[in-house]
Amino acid sequence: MDDELNTFLTAQRAFTDRVHAVGEDEWERATPCRDWTVADLVGHLIEEHRWAAPLLHGQDLESAGKIVAGSRRLPVDGGIGANRAEEWDEAAVESADAFAADGALDRTVSLSRGPTPARAYIAEMILDLVVHGWDLGRAIGYDKPLPEDVVEAVYAEVANFGDLSESGGFDEPVDVPDDAPTIDKLIARTGRNPG
């Protein structure tokens, strides 16, 4: 199996474990993502993973957007609880199947910034799974660590990006000691305080 696909699937399983660990009374908890509850954060990942299949199957943004909009469900229980976990499971299977399809990682996808190699796309998805997996774990008190090999791979890539806050998608980096765990270094680069 391709290393990037294996890393993606491992990161996705770790996020799934956290989604299924959310208690019924925890969906409205705050997360380290400003203004996002646990339900909002999981909803963001659901939406993100619903885009993978149409994009990897060659749809442009407009066509993919229509497909994604058609796959949204009317909320049950305000869109939280078991319904949200079920939606995540479905979106995760769809994106995993799309990335695992023969030749998928050699394709080009249409993103908002323009044509993008699928390998760059999956790398972004892995980053989101790890960072938001940390966010979700922190929000619900989930203590099992993220897979170290995945964290190391993501940090190695992110370390080459410079100041992530310049993209507008992250806060200013947080200082951590040089001997901090890799997950702390990664999280700090995204403007989150790992302490």
Image (cartoon, rainbow, N blue to C red):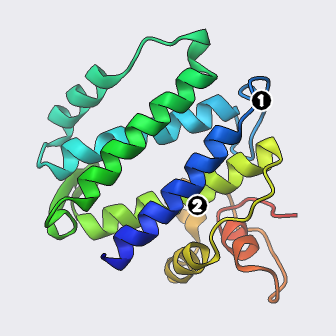
Residue 55 x/y as whole percent: 21, 47
How packed is label 2: few (under 14 Cα within 10 Å), some, or many (20 or more)?
A: many
Going 56% across and 18% down the picture, which residue do you hit? 79
**Is residue 36 shown to the viewer in this render?**
no
Residue 98 x/y as whole percent: 24, 52
Q: Earlier in the sequence, mark 2 or mark 1?
A: 1
Going 13% across and 43% down the picture, which residue do you hit? 59
| Side of 66 where 31 appears, left or right | right
Residue 70 vertical position relative to residue 23 in the rendered view, above or below: above
Going 70% across and 32% down the picture, which residue do you hit? 37
Residue toward you, 91 or 32? 91
| Image quadrant assignment for residue 23 | top right
Residue 42 x/y as whole percent: 57, 37
| Side of 96 where 148 appears, left or right | right
| Image quadrant assignment for residue 82 | top right
- Quarter of the image for the N terminus: give it: bottom left
Going 88% across and 64% down the picture, which residue do you hit? 195
Residue 173 vertical position relative to residue 13 in the rendered view, above or below: below
Q: Secondary structure at mark 1?
A: loop
Residue toward you, 154 or 24? 24
Q: Which residue is mark 2?
A: 130
Amino acid bearing label 1? Glu
Q: Which residue is mark 1?
A: 26
Residue lying farthest to the bottom in this orientation: 179
Q: Secondary structure at mark 2?
A: helix
| Side of 95 where 147 appears, left or right | right
